[in-house]
């Protein structure tokens, strides 16, 4: 049996651990041969491959990134994309595909399987932890760890200067990284995309923290938005209020806080360091187990499925389940965290 | 309502995060007052307390250890232990107890509640992750992270000298730390207490790794034991084979490997560094949520219960469920890891 | 003998280690009493103090920030500032001052000593390592370590997406952090304030790196400037070319690279995480030794001096020497690093 | 010009950084070709080589260990060792050798140059920092960092249980790692090989620490020895008192402390984790600069020399200077640290 492997979407610590586990078990226990498609679906469309076998995956477990490269190419938006994929699978005699990626990559895998009968198994990947049907995805724990360590460092700076420090973390549509790192880092305010925030309320929390003689840390997801329509953002496109973006939410909020409370405020945008580098032990464990179970599914011919974490078990669910709906932060969970605000 | 809080058993990263969450929510949302008992059940027996309130718990979230101190005192093995506890609860006007600890500490809480009607809520704690009724306990993720980082470092030393490196990690009765850190660290052999190991098999794996031109890392739980009866251990007591201990299993195994394979072998015993220091982000998150839910249970008068993690939810289970049976590594899970041996 | 201690200027890991060493040795070996002035020179001017003695400094060694607080107040720019300081030193019966800070803080100490005869000893502090008369200052090693770790993480993201990653690090006037972290992190381009850079040359290096099938990391000090006059910066003031700032140099450069090379480029601005949190072992060692030698100088009445590192020795130099001239990166040293560019 | 490179002696973070810098600058700026000798002098004697050039050294900067392998082979203790080396240098047309190693490796290089006219340049390497003629060697800062982090973790365990924690760190003949990590970690006792220790004095410090309601950390170099002759060590050979070793000094000392003070004491032996894994930023910087200057020396034909750090400069000294005398901890420096004991 010959198995194709590809990784799509944004970089995420643990991708290499999945690849290694798939190949190690596939070759050793099931006698599979492998081929890697370069740069996600793009390599499958264009027929660009990399050799893949046990020697190629030695030593990659602790390394971030992906030895296969990645892209955001969508074959359904590429002319003849699906036909090219079918041709290339035939050309390289690929019997099954393991697609490792997020909503987009898995969405393609689901359609290729459901509509074109291509035997695909999915492995969920998202830093943001916003894929349904799995308790966690690898990469998230690493990102939360990095953000928490940064918040730990910022506390001392805030205290020494009695300043507000606003930390902008990843999370365009879901606030998981903000919520987890904010709680773990002892933030005094946590703002997530799921709930529009009230700048005056934020300022009230900030002020109350100063009254207790401490300096506040405000953790804000990049996708968080104020209730009132005056946020102007940085990318030149108009936001949902019809304003042009001039800055990210973190910088915008720091300015608002300064103006409304009279306290100095500074912003740190953590950015790409959240998604690079060596995966945490938890992510290596999860990614490795995802890989082992994905190749089991291939071996059993259980296609159209995605591996998922439920409690401490790895289970299989229809790929479509994962991509049907974004997993956002439950309001009750966010309220639970609220006891630490202010 | 006045609530007593105590921490018992071995040190564990996250204890302070629990205490902080209990106090913060209890005082702020439920109007509770608090008293800390010093050094676990010993403080409850001897009436030694520390003041506990929001100012006392500020800044302790990222700190390892426990501000309340700990001990292994068991009031049921102390003369008049239970009577003294009842007297002290009366004296300090304590309406409910939050007991944070492992098998022993929680076992006492279960009996105090079930047999003496003392209103207790339990919070599970064990580095070793061997408590039933909860998916994970805080401290475990931190320990696995430290062990994995150590294994990462040892790989390069092993490779540079083409030596075997044996890493002894915690786990007297359960192999969770060995299994998780071994998988995450890319170990070539993992040995756990749940399954007696065959030294010749270990040597075969070691030899096969060298044949692939790599140097092997052997991760062994401190409680792992060989199949054959020749292990002589360090503490002067006789082991289950009737031999006197002269060394830990790591050192013993390194010597055996050297003799049987002719390859140099070295041992590193990670020891106490696995249980100290700042908790990982995951452990701070879990410990904080345990604390919030424990004080909810107190507030609702739901005594005799312990908070537990099920998937991503915090639930309540009878304390007795957690202590009924050690949670050991499932043979299937251990077999799953076996694909990486050798 | 009663000694006043204060910390001024920006937050810097190691400040607490200095305070602890000064107090520990002063109290224990020389029988000194201590008083802390709050928030740098501001506390000395306004007579705001904190009690300082061995109990107050226990446990602060690994903690970032400063227990004394900090500010940028300059008594020479404050009405009656110097007179108020003299009054407060008399009021609190302070016989000598230990001033821990950078160019500004030490400049004040030098003038107070030289012009007003106030007995001061200086301890040099700067993240940026740009103080003359000392090989290194504490805080710098920590900042370089944090930046290097971030660069390590960004490599995998760059490789996975074959993108340029621009990392903006601290250093307004001196490129020490950029140079050290860039070299340690394996950056492909390092840009420092001491040498105007040529955007086309940067693009040539970037392109050459891609040709070798690797993705480039560009480390740029916040104060670096292009040769040609088209940089528009973010703070609304005009830069030296008469343009208004719209963004930091990192963001500006990423856009230029994208436009000129056609390659995707992203920016990460490390910001305040470089100056917060626990100091590195080297910085704790250096800060501790600075503290010990500063109190020796006080004890010996050797005022107007600053402690400094020369090789592995701590020596004393006139405070004025340190503030006379910024220590910038030697062109030869920068050229040496150039072998890794491209 | 063809240059041979080899790494000898114990593993040390930074070896790969040296190799990379030598090759990168040599090939790029001086047009050198390279050959790597496998496993230190052994490869030079046996004629085992690895290809070495810019592609081989890409990506190795952050990796611990050495891509060339290492051994402790001494050609002067090998039959025909020197003749074989000369033959192999001729066979591979090697014009000059860069030898990276400690006392032994450099001692060989010195004799090969001085007695046999073989053109050698040395690069000093020792975790222990005990080589004369250089302020620091790479690997040392990494080791101190790891040990300090471990001590940070052990503090909380010690406090929680009010126990003594003895940490045994590397350093057979010199106490540099113990001194630096002990100071940086806030140890309460530091014991080094340079000064025999008095167990009763250690116990007095331990007791005094407990009186202040803190738990003591004792950092002891593996080569430290008590004043009185009752230490029995672990390796079965007799120690300098004629006793057989049954345990390392850490374990022995913990037992003595328990017996003499009645306080619980535990030992952690850090072992090999101190010498493995990714180098600190400082060590990468130092190792890289050593490499750059070593190939400069080769290019200039300045043989028999070793690169060395003096302050912030890299200088050249006769190799023999480095190996003439062990660099041990100055008694005054050790006394300076004593203010923190107890």
Image: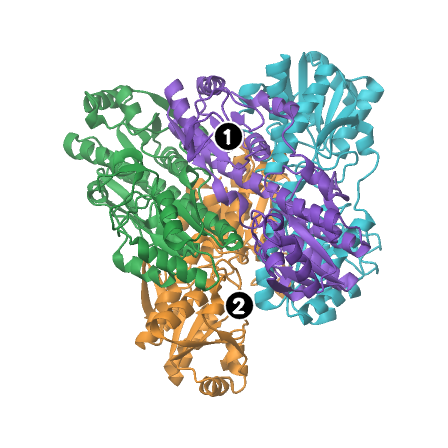
Chain colours: A purple, B cyan, C green, D orange
Q: Is residue C97 left or right of residue B231?
A: left
Residue D305 locus on image (x, y percent): 35, 73
Which mark, residue B153? none
Residue D30 locus on image (x, y percent): 34, 73
User: The residue tagged with tag 2: helix, strand or loop?
Assistant: loop
Nearer to me, C322 or A16: A16
Q: Residue furthest front?
A: A79
Which mark, residue A219? 1
Q: Is residue B54 left or right of residue B299?
A: left
Chain ID for label 2?
A: D
Nearer the observer: mark 2 or 1; the answer is: 1
Q: Residue at x 52, y 87 (%)?
A: D80
Nearer to me, C25 or B5: B5
Q: Residue at x 69, y 58 (%)?
A: A86
Q: Residues within 10 Å of mark 2 (few under 14, many from 20)?
A: many
Residue A103 locus on image (x, y percent): 64, 42
Q: In the displayed structure, would residue A49 be above or below residue A331?
A: below
Residue B341 visible (yes or no):
no
User: The residue tagged with tag 1: helix, strand or loop?
Assistant: strand
The quarter of the displayed image where residue D153 is located? top right
The quarter of the displayed image where residue C110 is located? top left
Q: Is residue C175 left or right of residue C207?
A: left
Marks 2 & 1 on one chain: no
Chain ID for label 1?
A: A
Q: Residue furthest left?
A: C115
Give the quarter of the figure containing the C terminus of chain C.
bottom left
Which mark, residue D67? 2
Q: Residue at x 63, y 57 (%)?
A: A44
The quarter of the displayed image where residue D113 is located? bottom left
């Amino acid at each position: 049996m010959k198995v194709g492997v590809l990784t799509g979407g944004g970089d995420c610590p643990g991708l290499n651990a999945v690849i290694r586990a798939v190949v190690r078990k596939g070759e050793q226990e099931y006698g599979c041969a492998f081929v890697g498609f370069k740069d996600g679906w793009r390599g499958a469309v264009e027929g660009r491959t990399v050799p893949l076998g046990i020697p190629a995956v030695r030593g990659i477990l602790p390394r971030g990134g992906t030895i296969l490269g990645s892209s955001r190419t969508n074959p359904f938006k590429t002319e003849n994309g699906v036909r090219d994929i079918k041709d290339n699978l035939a050309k390289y005699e690929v019997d099954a595909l393991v697609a490792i990626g997020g909503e987009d990559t898995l969405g393609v895998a689901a359609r290729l399987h459901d509509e074109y009968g291509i035997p695909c198994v999915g492995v969920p990947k998202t830093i943001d932890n916003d894929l349904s049907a799995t308790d966690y995805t690898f990469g998230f724990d690493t990102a939360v760890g990095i953000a928490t360590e940064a918040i730990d460092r910022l506390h001392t700076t805030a205290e020494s200067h009695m300043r507000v420090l606003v930390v902008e973390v990843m999370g365009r549509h879901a606030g998981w990284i903000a919520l987890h790192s904010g709680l773990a880092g002892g933030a005094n305010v946590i703002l997530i995309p799921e709930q529009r925030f009230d700048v005056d309320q934020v300022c009230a929390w900030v002020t109350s923290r100063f009254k207790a003689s401490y300096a506040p840390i405000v953790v804000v997801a990049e996708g968080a938005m104020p209730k009132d329509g005056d946020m102007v953002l940085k990318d030149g496109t108009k936001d949902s209020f019809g304003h042009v973006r001039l800055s990210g939410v973190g910088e915008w909020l720091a300015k608002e806080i300064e103006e409304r409370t009279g306290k100095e405020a500074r912003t740190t945008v953590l950015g790409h360091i959240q998604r690079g580098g060596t995966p945490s032990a938890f992510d290596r464990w999860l990614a490795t187990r995802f890989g082992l179970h994905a190749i089991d599914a291939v071996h059993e011919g259980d296609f159209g499925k995605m591996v998922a974490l439920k409690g401490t078990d790895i289970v299989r669910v229809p790929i479509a389940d994962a991509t049907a709906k974004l997993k956002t932060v439950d309001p009750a969970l966010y309220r639970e965290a609220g006891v630490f605000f202010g």
